[in-house]
Image (cartoon, rainbow, N blue to C red):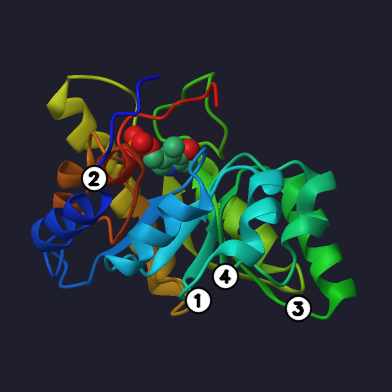
Amino acid sequence: MTGQSVDIEQNVGNLLSQIPEKNPFGESVTLVAAVKTQTAESINRAICAGVTDIGDNHAQEFKANYGLISGNPRRHFIGHLQTNKIKYLLGKVDLYHSVDRLPLAVELSEKSARAGVTSQILMQINIGNEASKGGFPPDEATAIYEVIKALPSLKIRGLMAMLPESDDLPLLRKLAGQMRAIYDVLREKDRDIAYLSMGMSGDWRLCVDCGSNMIRLGTAIFGPRNYNV
Ligand SMILES: *Cc1c(COP(=O)(O)O)cnc(C)c1O
């Protein structure tokens, strides 16, 4: 890696001016900075530039950086979560996006109860039915919602999805629209449901256009990730 510098401040400024104030459903859109592999210094630069929400993928990184983050941003956990790592996050994460299997929901509920906290969660949906991705099958979302809803110490706040990597825009729009439809069904039942977390650096415009109200951007803020540091 050369010491190529990335203008995080300019990237955040551009994004905050490009992200529409409201999606087509009249909802405001929250930008979550996806901070995996980034140093606390870079994360703090993004926060100084106007980022209010940050999302971690790795419990160890979250723990290592926790005391080094300034500005008191809202904290999201967006990565695959192993049950033995929950203890590092309990009471510190404002929203868990990646609840992708029932045993994880059960364990997060039990550990939250023991710690005396309620954990706010999104159900991750595998909207493209991809073997490489976690999440609940779209056609089981409502049934699984009812099961998770019955667990104490969790509050379901919405849904999270990752669209497949594809240039097929009609397909991506169809899948994003299906996510919005599932979201609308659940929101009819439950007014605590307020977040549809969908959209990354490559597809956030399409996702917001199709009804996402929370986007998770890494590369667009910090530049390409270097996994070898
Ligand atoms: C890394 C990551 C992102 C951000 O990806 P970019 O393409 O860099 O914007 C969003 N969501 C999740 C779950 C991620 O792991």
Nearer the observer, disc 1 or disc 2?
1
The correct choice, above or below, for 168 with respect to 153 in the image is above
Direction from residue 91 to residue 144 in the image, left or right: left
Q: Name the residue under label 4.
A: 94
Do tag 3 and tag 4 residues touch (Cβ < 8 Å)? no
Q: Which of marks 1 and 2 is nearer the N terminus?
A: 1
Res. 194 visible in picture: yes
Nearer the observer, disc 1 or disc 4?
1
- Spatial CA span between label 1 and label 4: 12 Å
Residue appearing at x 43%, y 80% in the figure: 191
- Spatial CA span between label 2 and label 3: 34 Å
Q: Name the residue under label 2.
A: 177
Do tag 2 and tag 3 residues touch (Cβ < 8 Å)? no
- Spatial CA span between label 1 and label 3: 19 Å
What's under tag 1, amino acid-wise? Answer: Asn
Do tag 1 and tag 2 residues touch (Cβ < 8 Å)? no
The correct choice, above or below, for 142 with respect to 90 in the image is above
Q: Which of marks 2 and 3 is nearer the N terminus?
A: 3
Q: Mark 3 points at which residue?
A: 117
Locate the C terminus and report the quarter of the image it occupies. Answer: top right
Q: Name the residue under label 1.
A: 72
Q: Which of 190 and 199 is in front in this view?
A: 199
Q: Where is residue 57 in the image (x, y as percent from the top left)?
A: 57, 43
- Spatial CA span between label 4 and label 2: 26 Å
Residue appearing at x 22%, y 44% in the figure: 204
Residue appearing at x 72%, y 72% in the figure: 91
- Spatial CA span between label 3 and label 4: 11 Å
Q: Does the residue labelled 2 lie within 8 Å of ligand 1?
A: no
